């Protein structure tokens, strides 16, 4: 299983992070949240006063930054230049900032290389927007999670509420729509799904049903999973 790469792509609010974490546990593989890496870079840009669309300075920043995960932590703790930023990257401002930063080609090149290095170390369940198209296009284990827009907004709203946020549902829905439009229409590696993916609509499924569907499909590919 060490070299097994599972790609889980899809828009925000489809349950990628929870599903990826559980699939990684079932398979005994590292969970690599690539969105957290774009978020970490956006956070560093904000702290340094670099605009999220300043392509030139972001290119320099990406090539001089290290982003890693603390092994064995669940959910994975994210290290930005060695410091734990796991909580600081989960704000609405950094969500949008990560989306904008991620449309800069030089940023993508640097982070895709880091993601490939992480995956090659010990395999992994990688979640993101371009894992099956750009990061590990050769893996046969590709899943595209989707859900109705209203369901996705509601899920994200509940997640934010649980953390004490009082942002109204309409605002969460609008920001999510804006971010998904930006992620799906950018020139470099937009979020797309083709026939090489197994597509799963999670709207009416429990998280256990999503995980079971992914693991069952991986078994069909002959991977040795319990
Ligand atoms: O999965 P997330 O919401 O944490 O991702 C934050 C942003 O990062 C997302 O809006 C787009 C970008 N992203 C990307 O472009 N490619 C990836 N593989 C993962 C995330």
Image: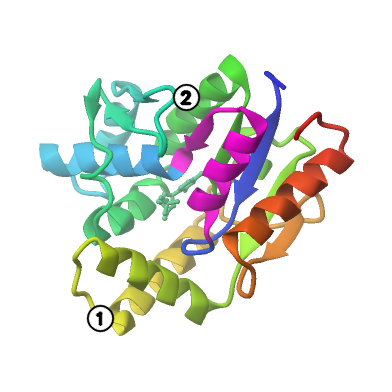
Residue labelled with disc 2: 114
C-alpha distance separating marks 2 and 1: 36 Å
Look at 18% across and 74% down and name the residue there: 166
Look at 68% across and 18% down and name the residue there: 2
Q: Residues within 10 Å of mark 2 (few under 14, many from 20)?
A: some
Residue labelled with disc 1: 168
- In the figure, is residue 205 to the left or right of 225? left
Secondary structure beneath label 1:
loop
Q: Is residue 192 visible?
A: no
Instruction: Specify the color scheme.
Output: rainbow
In front of the other: 148 or 214: 214
Of badges 2 and 1, the one in the foreground is: 1
Mark 1 beta carbon near ligand 1 (under 8 Å): no
Q: Residue 178: image x %, image y %?
A: 39, 71
Secondary structure beneath label 2:
helix
Q: Where the C terminus falls, by quadrant?
A: top right
**From what the image shows, is residue 196 above or below residue 140?**
below
In the rendered image, residue 82 lying in the magenta stretch gets the answer no
Among the 4 quarters of the image, the one containing residue 88: top left
Look at 83% across and 39% down and name the residue there: 219
- In the figure, is residue 48 to the left or right of 98? left
In the rendered image, residue 30 lying in the magenta stretch gets the answer yes
Q: Earlier in the sequence, mark 2 or mark 1?
A: 2
Q: Residue 183: image x %, image y %?
A: 48, 59
In front of the other: 216 or 192: 216
Q: Is residue 64 visible?
A: yes
Q: Residue furthest front?
A: 226
Chain part drawn in magenta: 15-34
Q: Do the residues bearing badges 2 and 1 touch, measured as CB atoms within 8 Å?
A: no
Look at 80% across and 38% down and name the residue there: 140
Predominant SS of the magenta segment: helix
Q: Residues within 10 Å of mark 1 (few under 14, many from 20)?
A: few
């Amino acid at each position: 299983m060490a070299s097994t790469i599972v790609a889980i792509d899809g828009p925000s609010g489809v349950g990628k992070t929870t599903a990826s974490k559980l699939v990684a546990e079932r398979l005994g593989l590292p969970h690599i949240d690539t969105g957290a890496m774009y978020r970490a870079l956006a956070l560093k840009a904000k702290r340094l006063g670099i605009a999220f669309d300043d392509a030139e300075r972001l290119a320099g920043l990406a090539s001089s930054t290290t982003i890693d995960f603390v092994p064995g932590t669940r959910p994975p703790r994210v290290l930005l230049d060695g410091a734990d930023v796991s909580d600081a990257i989960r704000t609405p401002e950094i969500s949008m900032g990560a989306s904008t930063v991620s449309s800069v080609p030089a940023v993508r090149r640097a982070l895709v290389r880091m993601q490939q290095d992480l995956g090659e170390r010990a395999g992994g369940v990688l979640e993101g927007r371009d894992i099956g198209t750009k990061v590990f296009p050769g893996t046969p284990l590709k899943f595209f999670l989707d859900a109705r827009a209203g369901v996705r907004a509601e899920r994200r709203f509940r997640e934010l509420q649980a953390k004490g946020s009082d942002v109204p549902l309409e605002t969460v829905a609008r920001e999510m729509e804006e971010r998904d439009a930006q992620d799906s229409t950018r020139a470099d590696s937009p979020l797309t799904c083709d026939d090489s993916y197994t597509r799963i609509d999670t709207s009416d499924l429990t998280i256990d049903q999503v995980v079971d569907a992914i693991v069952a499909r991986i078994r069909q590919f002959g991977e040795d999973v319990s």
